[in-house]
Image (spheres, rainbow, N blue to C red):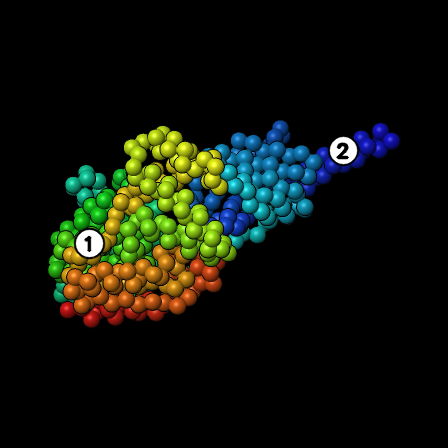
Amino acid sequence: MKQGLLFLFLLASLSLAAQNITGTWYGYPDLKTNRLRLEIQISNTDTRYTASLKMPDISQELHPATRVSVQGDTLLLVFPEVGVACEGICRSDSLVTGIIHWGQYAFPLELNRHPVVFHRPQTPQPPFPYRSEDVAIPNEADGITLAGTLTLPDTTGKCKAVIIVSGSGAQDRNNTFFEHKTYLVLADYLSRQGIAVLRMDDRGVGQSEGNAATACLPDAISDTRAAIAYLKMRPEIHPDSIGIIGHSEGAFVAFTLAATGETPFIISLAGGGVNGSELLLMQRAALLKANGANDDFINLYNGYMRQAQDIVLQTGTPEACMQRLAQVLAGTSLAGQEASLTAQLFNPAKIELMKYDPAYDFQQIKCPVLALNGTKDCQVPIENLGKIKEGISANGNTHVTIISYPGLNHMFQPARTGLPVEYSDIEETISPQVLKDIAQWLKALR
């Protein structure tokens, strides 16, 4: 009997080793807020296994595993650089099922031998009927140089131009996500319509100088001012016809510079019409609602989050913030999460966002405004569109146009729920109707 048990144990311990786990494995886990492609390379030397992880939707960087454990049919891979661990059962040479630990959360995981390939039919392909030039934009006020691409229509005389300003987070000049390139598609379309477009890498991203970790709304405003100054020096561009297209938080940049008269027209793509703190609460409510949460839970949760946001704005250090949050959240459903909430909210980008209130800028905006929003937007809900119209029109500005797009999400893609987790699976990068409406509105401006 003991020999039989020993024989079964040896079979179990050899089952994974008998299968070929070396080579490349691919995963595409649902992380609830989004999905990410994983590429895991496993190698075997004479003495041990080694592994590396690449997440191509974030970067091409390889992250080495500090632990590769093979016990029976169980495989464990730990990648501490990115806070990821994968644990699963090897079903065959081509299938591992298990879980992925992402920070403090765990999600189902399947690894197989088939790469996930995205299809992005709208991505422009050469030859192009316009000139494309990589440019350097000096921001002398802040002592940095920004990198971007300027597309110039093949026309004679000076042309109208727009600067695309990205939303929150570190974005490259194309707003690349899951191989979508929203701003490239937009720039291509507009330049074919006779409009010059400047799109830039955010601070500390791509070839732009600066610190992405500390970049915030005032920095984006400063960088956009530098971009306006740069375009005014270009002989191909009319210096009095340089507008701003602000996407999401980028719309706040457009509102600020329109209020000070530094731009003659602006376009808001899914921009907020309320203060940043309120916008975060609206966003959480929309995301929770789309995930199936009921109104009672949403109201309770956002009640705690409103207190947390107020504390962040009232305290001067992360330590003080964490201590105050611990006191306020004690005995609530968020008890014990003061560290993660502090990490999420107590940073320059979030603090400056929560401090900003567009109502003050709305009073001063006299130029033409086009504001667009999708009805399925869970990041900047559709209600913001009416707030923008109401706020700017109140000062007597009659040149405010708003357009609502049924079924489109925050990226202006056709969506089922509008949740960010869908972004990667939608092949369309941006609605053709949105592109058409933007171009028509710009060409109609005098």
Q: Position of residue 19 (x, y in %)?
A: 68, 42
Q: Position of residue 427 (x, y in %)?
A: 45, 62
Packing grade of label 1 (10 A; few <14, some 14-19, many >=20) is: some
| Residue 338 - label | none
Q: Which residue is nearer to you in this view: 102 or 203? A: 102
**Sooner in the amino-acid sequence: mark 2 or mark 1:** 2
Q: Is residue 130 left or right of residue 185?
A: left
The quadrant the N terminus occupies is: top right
Q: Is residue 211 above or below residue 114?
A: above
The residue indicated by pointer 2 is 10
Residues at badges 2 and 1 in contact (C-beta under 8 Å)?
no
The residue indicated by pointer 1 is 361
Q: Quadrant of residue 406?
A: bottom left
Helix, strand or loop at mark 1: helix
Q: CA distance from mark 2 to mark 1?
A: 72 Å
Q: Position of residue 12 (x, y in %)?
A: 74, 36
Packing grade of label 2 (10 A; few <14, some 14-19, many >=20) is: few
Q: Quadrant of residue 382?
A: bottom left
* Residue type at numbered disc 1: Asp
Q: Which residue is nearer to you in this view: 128 or 357? A: 357
Query: Among all residues in the image, which is located at the extreme right?
Result: 1
Decide if residue 125 is in sight here.
no
* Residue type at numbered disc 2: Leu
Helix, strand or loop at mark 2: helix
Q: Is residue 191 above or below residue 31?
A: below
Q: Which residue is nearer to you in this view: 106 or 136? A: 106
Q: Position of residue 251 (x, y in %)?
A: 27, 55
